[in-house]
Image: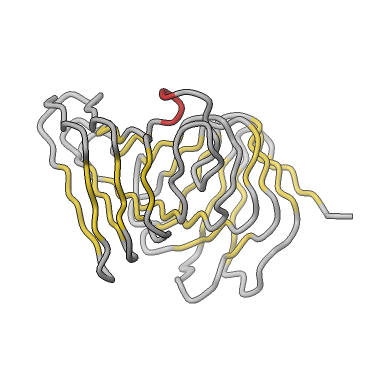
Amino acid sequence: DTNSLTVLSGAEFELYKTTNPQYWEVVLEDGSTFDAANSSDNSGQNRWAGPVQLNGAVTLTGGSGFYATLLGAISGSGPLNKTGSGATITIGSTNNTYTGATLISAGTLAVSNLASVGEASSLGQPGNAADGTIKLGSTSNSRALTYYGNGVTTDRILDMAGTTGGAIVNHSTQGLLKFVNDVTTSGSGAKTLSLGGSFGGSGELSGSINNS
């Protein structure tokens, strides 16, 4: 049987430079936090390979320059909020089924599958456009979504949720990354949408970019 760890509401679960993937199931209760801690780097540290259950609103965070990777399937409700300026959390599983919204309020969230609403993906399986909207930014700082999977066309909406903090979308692999819907701006204030990439990939925004 798989060992299970439950992180209660208000508690924080820190990964401290773990060098081997951890295969326990982790249950994150509403109001709990998963933290990439203590100078972890991107050389394979802090990999959680067991399943992750979201029982309500959960925060992913870390200190500046810290890294963590979630390799196991993520299920449950959510929403999921990435915080921690300068921290990078990678969601390696491509078939997650959590149903809540995904917010990138600080730092970088890296994913390998951006399927459309209703389909399992790195960012869950939301049942409607509102929960499928990817909110980027909070207040005055820019936040980043990095995509490193195969080329994909998605109806997920990108929302610039900051006030003066913009949104960054990086396409870090080959193939076409295409968003078919408008880019929305729920946050009031002037901000910048930055698009970047590497490894010969291309990107397309088929809709309009709304003016806040």
Q: Residue at x 84, y 55 (%)?
A: 2
Measuring from the top left, give residue 179's x and y in whole percent.
30, 41
Measuring from the top left, give residue 199's x and y in whole percent.
28, 71
- 121 vs 77, nearest the viewer: 121
Q: Is residue 70 above or below residue 166?
A: below
Quadrant of image for the C terminus: top left
Using the rendered view, name the quadrant where residue 20 is placed: bottom right
Measuring from the top left, give residue 178's x and y in whole percent.
29, 46
State how the image is colored. secondary structure
- 173 vs 39, nearest the viewer: 173
Quadrant of image for the N terminus: bottom right
Q: How many marks?
A: 0
Measuring from the top left, give residue 9's x and y in whole percent.
64, 32
Q: Is residue 39 above or below residue 181?
A: below
Q: Residue at x 28, y 32 (%)?
A: 181
Tell whether 43 sits left or right of 97.
left
Q: Residue at x 39, y 49 (%)?
A: 84
Using the rendered view, name the quadrant where residue 159 is placed: top left
Tell whether 57 sits left or right of 172.
right
